[in-house]
């Protein structure tokens, strides 16, 4: 490339192609493990089984990989971003607190991966500012784990696309029935199940759903006139009556500030206790999903809220 701008543009164009993320390991001349993060992995041949990857000639690991006669390619799983970042740093003690074993080729093999290709080095080729290493696979393994993907300069996740086969209808109006392909049933059931710990906490505190909605609203906007509270919650079916608001003031959940209503000490404490239960349950749920799945779920729900929320007031600011 003739100048820096052309090199930048070339790199950006290459980033349009999604790649897997690997950690490649070997031993140096003293038998010390070395490793690098690489996205240049590719298959070459099935018979014999050959794979390749490339390494910058400027890499401190260059001599070790070119002279060791072996390397192990670990295809990383979606949850291994931190490990990828560790092995991408120059000069760091990459193997600190990382357990490994000696593989069939003699190269270090890490404990966790989506797939492993343990290789002896067959060929080394010049590739401009990189060296291309071709290895013969002497052992391999595949785990049931989604791979980590790199695209557009950031980590991504691979997703299996739904089948093109037409799904069964979610609703049968003639029979008056529906299945779990009915989207609104899924949304409603997910809400009902995920809000169960919150409802149980409200029962423990002696609060109704209407009272909780008032406390939640005033935690986001406060103080607020009684008419605005009723208008903001009207779409929920849990809009409080004037008598209900007066009762909440008398019980110490709310307090009057001139003509406006705001949370009182007891109301704020009750809301925070309930919110803590909901947050703890969210953390228990989300550890079973990848960050990408959580982000996609939030994106879908926000869009669902947008397309169904014409005229519905937004409580938070």
Image (cartoon, rainbow, N blue to C red):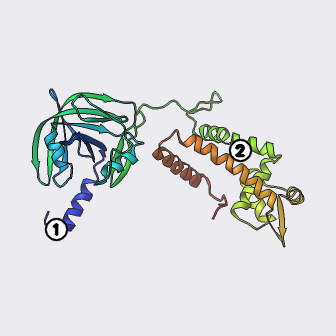
Q: Quadrant of the C terminus?
A: bottom right
Labels 1 and 2 touching (C-beta < 8 A): no
Q: Residues within 10 Å of mark 2 (few under 14, many from 20)?
A: many
Question: Which of these two is toward me, 93 or 188?
Answer: 93
Furthest-front residue in this view: 30
Circle 1 — which element?
A: loop
Q: How far from the left and from the top, in percent, is residue 285? A: 58, 40
- Identified at 13% across, 41% down, the residue is 67
Q: Quadrant of the N terminus?
A: bottom left
Disc sitting over residue 198 in the figure: 2
Q: Is residue 243 above or below residue 209?
A: below
Quarter occupied by residue 224: bottom right
Disc sitting over residue 3 in the figure: 1
- Identified at 31% across, 53% down, the residue is 89
How far apart marks 1 and 2 lie (CA) works out to 60 Å
Q: Residues within 10 Å of mark 1 (few under 14, many from 20)?
A: few
Circle 2 — which element?
A: helix
Disc sitting over residue 73 in the figure: none
Q: How far from the left and from the top, in percent, is residue 309? A: 62, 55
Sequence-wise, the earlier of marks 1 and 2 is: 1
């Amino acid at each position: 490339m003739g100048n820096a701008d052309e090199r930048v543009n070339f790199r950006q164009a290459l980033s349009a192609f999604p790649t897997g993320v690997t950690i490649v390991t070997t031993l140096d001349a003293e038998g010390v493990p070395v490793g690098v993060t690489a996205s240049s992995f590719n298959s070459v041949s099935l018979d014999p089984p050959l794979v390749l990857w490339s390494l910058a000639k400027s890499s401190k690991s260059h001599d070790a990989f070119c002279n060791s006669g072996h390397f192990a390619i670990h295809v990383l799983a979606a949850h291994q971003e931190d490990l990828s970042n560790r092995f991408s740093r120059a000069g760091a003690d990459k193997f600190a607190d990382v357990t490994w074993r000696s593989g069939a080729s003699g190269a270090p093999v890490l404990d966790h991966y989506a797939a492993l290709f343990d290789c002896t080095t067959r060929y080394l080729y010049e590739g401009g500012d990189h060296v291309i290493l071709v290895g013969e696979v002497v052992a391999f393994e595949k785990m049931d784990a989604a791979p980590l993907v790199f695209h557009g300069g950031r980590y991504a996740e691979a997703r299996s696309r739904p089948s093109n086969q037409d799904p069964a209808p979610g609703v049968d109006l003639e029979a008056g029935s529906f299945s779990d392909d009915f989207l609104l049933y899924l949304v409603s059931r997910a809400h009902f199940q995920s809000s169960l710990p919150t409802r149980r906490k409200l029962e423990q505190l002696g609060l109704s759903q209407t009272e909780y909605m008032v406390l939640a609203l005033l935690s986001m906007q406060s103080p607020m006139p009684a008419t605005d509270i009723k208008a903001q919650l009207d779409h929920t079916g849990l809009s409080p009556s004037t008598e209900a608001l007066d009762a909440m003031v008398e019980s110490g959940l709310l307090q009057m500030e001139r003509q406006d209503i705001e949370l009182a000490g007891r109301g704020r404490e009750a809301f925070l206790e309930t919110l803590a239960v909901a947050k703890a349950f969210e953390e228990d749920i989300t550890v079973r999903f990848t960050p990408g799945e959580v982000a996609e779920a939030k994106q879908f729900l926000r869009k669902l809220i947008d397309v169904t929320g014409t005229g519905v007031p937004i409580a938070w600011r």
